[in-house]
Amino acid sequence: MKRIVVRSYGSPDQLTLEDSQPPSPGPGQVLVHLSAAGVNPVDTYRRAGTQGYTPDLPFTPGFEGAGVVAAVGADGQPVSAGQGTPAAKGNPAPALVVGQRVYVGWSVSGTYGQWCIADRSQVFALPPSLSFFQGAGLFVPYFTAYRGMVFRGGVQKGAKVLIHGASGGVGSAALFWASYLGLLAWGTAGSSEGVQRVLNQGALGCWNHRYPGYWVIMAREVGRFDLILEMNAHTNLQGDLGLLSPAGRVMVVGSRGDIAITPRRLMGIEGDIRGVVLAKNTGEENHLTAVELERALEQGGHIPEPRVFPLSQASEVHRLVESGEASSGKMVLDCR
Ligand code: NAP
């Protein structure tokens, strides 16, 4: 079987395709034969050894994927994972059977390949309406967006929400949740094609964040937002503070550097800046999110088809993620 391996930190060329045989799953673990793996910006930080990520070498990148259960380890305490994976707390372990279609989060072995090992509590039944490609990109974006909006953001029905960076993986997931939760959502994107995609996903409006005057236009057209889900805090945080409603919250999901802010902007409105990190989800929160996702799909929620690339092109996909060019939504690797 094939999988991608990183043997030293560096450029996308460090992603090499190797042969490897899957191990047997340990107690509380599951072996999944993967059809697809989701690609996320964090995979590029870990490959490069940047942004505070220095996983033990060698390793296989990728936290999320979708496929079928190939083997289930003996019952027991879920094995706490390596590679910075958080231990699952209080999660009702799902009943899994060999051959079942599943999606995976926080794989302990990495998902860029034809197999992965995951803690049982981090393997979820793949809703029947979803393809493996859609399923491969569920965990990181959809669970992060839900954490930012609900668990940390405390958003209420009817709230005005700005998804600052709505054209990427997390932003697209946030639009999915906004529709399900009955929020009034606006977004930004970096290209006219991205703007159109965001509007097609139900945003009430979308502005191009590469156009310098867009801040003024957002303020003129909408005024203030109760919640801002921020993908690029190192460029936007100061501006966001000027767009917050009284008691509004900026949720920092993504940030790749420093920025100066004017704290006084928070005083009069008693606004908050809150960090969001998916790794803080408890097992129970993951379980709740998976249940809500199924419910949202049953009510007509739509998960866009991702862009699919062969596993052998993992390096090219990392280059695309790092290019900073306008994103074209979620990208996944075909592992079959
Ligand atoms: P992605 O698919 O690569 O998308 C990046 C998004 O950022 C795109 O919508 C992009 O828009 C947008 N963007 C680029 N420049 C922007 C700007 N100046 N203002 C606002 N948005 C801008 O990445 P992702 O998976 O959505 O992740 C987004 C960020 O969240 C990344 O930094 C990632 O590392 C982070 N993240 C954090 C967590 C967590 O637990 N905290 C979890 C997942 C992801 P265009 O491409 O259209 O310009």
Image: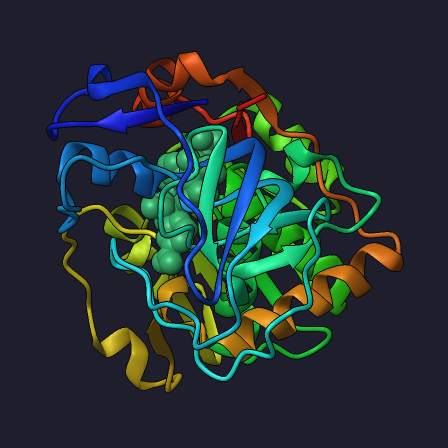
The quarter of the image that holds ligand 1 is top left
Q: Where is residue 225? Give x, y as percent.
A: 54, 67
The answer to whether residue 267 is left or right of residue 187 is: left
Res 88 → quadrant: bottom left
Q: Up-down: is 336 above or below 221?
A: above
Residue at position x 41%, y 66% in the image: 251
The quadrant of the picture occupied by the N terminus is top left
The answer to whether residue 206 of the structure is visible from this angle is: yes
Closest to the observer: 257 or 25? 25
Q: Report the number of discs.
A: 0
The answer to whether residue 213 of the structure is visible from this angle is: no
Colour pattern: rainbow
Q: Where is residue 184? Give x, y as percent.
A: 70, 62
Q: Residue furthest right?
A: 299
Q: Up-down: is 110 above or below 52?
A: above
Res 99 → quadrant: top right
Closest to the observer: 266 or 97? 97
The quadrant of the picture occupied by the C terminus is top right
Closest to the observer: 104 or 94? 94
Q: Where is residue 119? Give x, y as percent.
A: 46, 61
Q: Up-down: is 327 above or below 234?
A: above
Residue at position x 14%, y 58% in the image: 260
Q: Where is residue 239? Give x, y as percent.
A: 33, 56
The answer to whether residue 256 is left or right of residue 32 is: left
Res 6 → quadrant: top left
Residue at position x 71%, y 61% in the image: 293
Residue at position x 48%, y 51% in the image: 140
